[in-house]
Image (cartoon, rainbow, N blue to C red):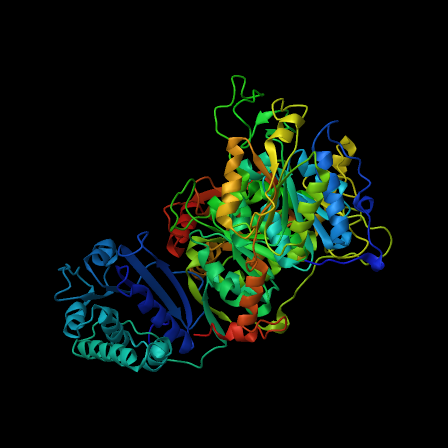
Amino acid sequence: MSISMIGQVALKPKDYKSEVPVVWCPGCGHYGILNGIYRALSEAGIDPSRLMSISGIGCSSRAPYFINSYKMHTLHGRAGAVATGAQLVRPDLTTLVMGGDGDGFSIGGGHMPHLARKNVDLTYVLFDNGIYGLTKGQYSPTSRPEMTAYTTPYGGPEAPMNPLLYMLTYGATYVAQAFAGKPGVCAELIKGALEHRGFAYVNIYSQCPTFNTVDTVEFYRDLVETVPQDHDVTDLGAAISLARRTSEGCAPMGLLYKVDRPTLDMQMTAIMDGVGGREDYDLNQIIDANRP
Amino acid sequence: MGKVDLVIKIAGEGGEGVISTGDFIAAACARAGQEVYTIKTFPAEIKGGYAMYQVRTSLDPVFNQGDTFDILCAFNGEAYEVNRQLLRPGVAFVYDYPDGGFEPEIPAGVHAYPIPMSRTAKEMKSYRSKNMVALGALSVLFNINEKTLLEVLVYKFRSKGTEKLNFNLDAFHKGKELAEGLVKTDPWRVADPVDPKDVIIVSGNEGVGLGAILGGLKFYSAYPITPATEIAKFVALHLPKVRGILIQAEDEIASLSQVLGASYAGARAMTATSGPGLSLMGEMLGMASMSETPVLVVDVQRGGPGTGMPTKHEQSDLFLAVFGSHGDAPRIVLAVEDVKDCIHMTVEALNLAELYQTPVILLSDGSLAFSTQTVPAPKLDAIRIVNRKRWDGQGVYQRYQMVADGISPMADPGTPGAMHMATGLEHGPTGAPNYVPGNHEAMHRKRFGKLQSVAEFVKPTEVDGEGWADVGIIAWGSTIGVVREAVTRLQADGVKVKGFYPKLMWPMPVAQYESFAKTCGKILVPEVNFQGQLSHFIRSETTLNPIPYTICGGVPFTPIQIMNKVREII
């Protein structure tokens, strides 16, 4: 991950705003998260031309359009997989993935475990609003049964998943949670994620005033509880215990887990070094190995 | 002098050494200066089941597996049962007897050579030596060069210790002695050694892997699938040597997603799969078309649809390769004829993806995947590498700038002043979303229009034969090799026939089809699928009226099938 300042002049949060106007509904929690991202990028001192912002499809997946950087707006659910390829080729740049709960855990659910398990060196900011907004309000993997919506007129038939438990279990090396109503907390945790070497997952609760009528600002404000000061972020068991408290009505806010483990690109470099890999390797050796 | 062109078939149970016996014979013949073309079938089971390896060897170039075998070596009763209908007069039949567990009936005219393979192996207290006994016997009976065979065996067993090597050589010599005690009645002899040629011997899958490395590949994302997996095996071994990356993805959707991301980041990138994987990649292929990102997907076709016949040969993914994705999603589709193509067309496919900033699909097939062939050793100075057009740093950068040839410069992330959005949404020149009707049409013209010059970039379609022909045969993929031989043999019989062998499948070089057809009476299109997929495209894109000839029994055509069909329709 490259942390640099352009011409030694620190960039301000507004310097990361692109010219594309933000298109979310009034009152949407995503504004707070985006502001947190701008602040985090600024505080981490990341050169926009050395940042790759990558998303899938959904309301939150529009975020890269609003950020000054290299960026890809890919397919529904595929942001993490696309980012894996980009990050491995350019481990010297910063890779930032943004997307929603449906994009990440429903259609893209097959990729999430492998980002964590492989410890791909990227930051994944998940805008968790418990609903599909772009398609006008269907239940998502993080919707609560109380929510009646487009395809759940009689209430939700499914139990919601717990993104923090999921990520901790699959081996993410940085796991944090925040609430869009606290952009300062968002910024701090995202900055930590950007500076973390490895797969960093930041789950951010974000109200959808248009379609999700149960997960309101007030609901989230009551739900979240700051991680205790004495919590040991290297203790997986303790992090899991905190994450499990979500179902008891107190979702942890803050950094739950942070450990160092070799990243996928580091492992790849080790393999190349191990075989004496070089850009100008004599290809005749490979040809000759196939003579009869 | 022995017969110049000989087909030796080894059959038995998986795990008995059928495949390694075939590999030893193929390598020994190649070392003795001969051309080699092999095919093999593995059992679908992990262990056991019927396995077959056929070696065709000749001093002249060989283009296919041949019509049938001249020599059968049966390791067990099933190998005899499966092939007994093919024991025609003149065939040499070597089999495990006595104590092989079966009592074959020897048809009149068949030359029988019973060799106690199992009994000898038992005496040596190792079942594993059975195939070496057979190899020794075959070497004596059919003049397989002993010197080169021993070289191959020493090379193969060098890492396994002297004891193991000597044990295998001992079994080999026992096999030789057993055969020396028999009277040879058949005429089959492998040609005497000539000066070895400057060749390598690789399978189609290894050829694709080698082509990828020679073609400057830097990123490969793999997902296991029969019959393509061996490509990843080859690339995984060698790619780190050139500081390239191979990772295994969680599924084929992720494979192509990772390839797209790697390519966006500036690397020559590819994946390989078979039909089911290509089906899963359909949406991301459209993303590559739309975002104009170079990606290469190699599809080693197998019997389909559904799970189909994973280990069997078929050419049935042409429709999928050309049209597989929603919307109007342009791409380039190529198909290889043989192992030599697997090497060189993979290089070219990577070039085309980079040059045209579009997905390229390279079609191979099940019979090529595991067919080992002798091919001229590639020469590095003859390998052409074409890189994508990159921004020169002048003016304001627009990723999808409207330019005359439709190919807008790319810019690698990290380049100052060229930050941009690569997107699957319809977009204007800057990459910003744009749904204005005129823009969508203009962008389609850009994405399709840039492919108009592809036919000029690749070699013109080969026409095999001159002058007027009563029948013109259009063949693609590994069927070409079969048709080549059929055309030569028919011409030798005075039949007016010629061949047309497209390797650029899409966009179709229509003018070349038309001009070929002007020199032919009827047009015959043999292909190994049910629907006649190339025939369909020929009817839809050209004025030709082809006669489809389709088989789909899981095995390739033989030259005699093509010859019979030509005689039938002429």
Determine the image quadrant of residue A126.
Answer: top right
Residue furthest right in the image = B395
Left or right: A40 as drawn, with respect to B259: right
Q: Please provide percent x and percent y for residue A76.
A: 60, 38
Q: Residue at x 62, y 31 (%)?
A: A129
Q: Please provide percent x and percent y for residue B400.
A: 76, 46
Left or right: B425 as drawn, with respect to B394: left
Residue furthest front in the image = A230
Q: Residue at x 25, y 78 (%)?
A: B167
Tell which of A83 and B543 is nearer to you. A83
Left or right: A119 as drawn, with respect to B486: right
Tell which of B12 and B180 is nearer to you. B12
Left or right: B294 as drawn, with respect to B377: right
* Residue A189 appears in the picture as rendered: yes
Q: Please provide percent x and percent y for residue B156.
A: 36, 75
Q: In the rendered image of this protein, does residue A27 appear above or below residue B281?
A: above
